[in-house]
Image (spheres, rainbow, N blue to C red):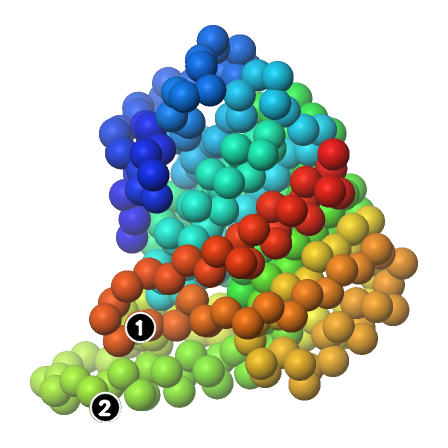
Amino acid sequence: MCAREAGNIVGDEQQCCLVTPKNPPPLGVGSLKVSMKTPRTAFPFYFGPADQPLFGCYHEPLMGHRRNCAIAICQPIGHEYIYCHRALRQLATRLCDSGFPVLRFDYYGCGDSSGNADQGGIPQWLEDISRAVSEVRHRAGLAQVCLIGLRLGATLSMITGIERGDINSLVLWDPVISGKAYLEGLFSLQKERLCLRPKPARGHKSESYTEILGFPLSRFLTAELEKLNLLSMAEKPAKNILAIQSDPALAESGWKEHLSQTDARLDHQHLAAPQIWLPTVDGNLLVPSPILQSIVSWTSRTHS
């Protein structure tokens, strides 16, 4: 679904080369002597169980400019993963430039991780996030971890924070509040896109999954999403929470009021920006710089 990433970050794009999964970069790569003008380097590697390896990309900040918190970025799934990929990659670069060790990773059955696209599910992905937390702690040598999630990635980040109880900070960027509403949106988008294309020839229809913009949505995952409701979770997911709302529909969901009832230090920001997880007319991938800057500023203040 996406290319394995590595190499030097130049401007907005990243020069890519393949690194053998069996030989990931050593820990402490930040000890390499580099000048301030040297392009940042993102190291690709695999981690987790040998029979279910997850693909990750680790961004190591320069020596002498390192903060006391590591960050793991939790991505959306399906077509939203594709449309948000560039923005989240740039977010990782900006956070790294600000001194944060950052791990981007793909869930099981997604991206360049092992497993088929129809094999993923919420319990598995929650395990994957926990593995990412352990991995970034190990590589960075830091105890504090901040999870940054977008859409379903934000939802899974919040659930992980509640279940683990050791996440210091959370950034929830337009999370999926109701799984049912999320599914309705996916089915509506699929129907809308089909109206713009020639009717395909009648073929075999799978009983195990439904296709959403070219990605399989399994019956198992559909059933899990139908039961998902963040407003039913009352526990505190983290000490510090930044809640970012660019989707107007979230204003009516009551999630701001729900988060306010926890003991977390909450910063809720309503930022006007395009919904970057939706297809664009020209196919361009959007990068909402004000949101990225807000996230970097908040994490930098929170983890000075």
How far across and how far down the image is residue 235, in percent? 83, 61
Q: Please tell me the numbered disc located at residue 280.
A: 1
**Left or right for 46, reference 141:** left
**Left or right for 283, reference 210:** left
Q: Is the residue marked by circle 1 packed among few (<14), some (14-19), or many (20+) residues within 10 Å?
A: few
Q: Amino acid at mark 1?
A: Thr
Q: Residue furthest front?
A: 37
Residue 110 in the image: above or below residue 114 = below
Q: Please tell me the numbered disc located at residue 130.
A: none
Name the mark nearer the viewer: 1 or 2. Answer: 1
Q: Residue at x 70, y 57 (%)?
A: 242
How far across and how far down the image is residue 175, in percent? 60, 67
Mark 2 lies on residue: 195
Q: Is residue 137 visible?
A: yes
Q: Residue at x 37, y 82 (%)?
A: 189
Q: Residue at x 67, y 74 (%)?
A: 229
- Mark sitting earlier along the chain (1/2): 2
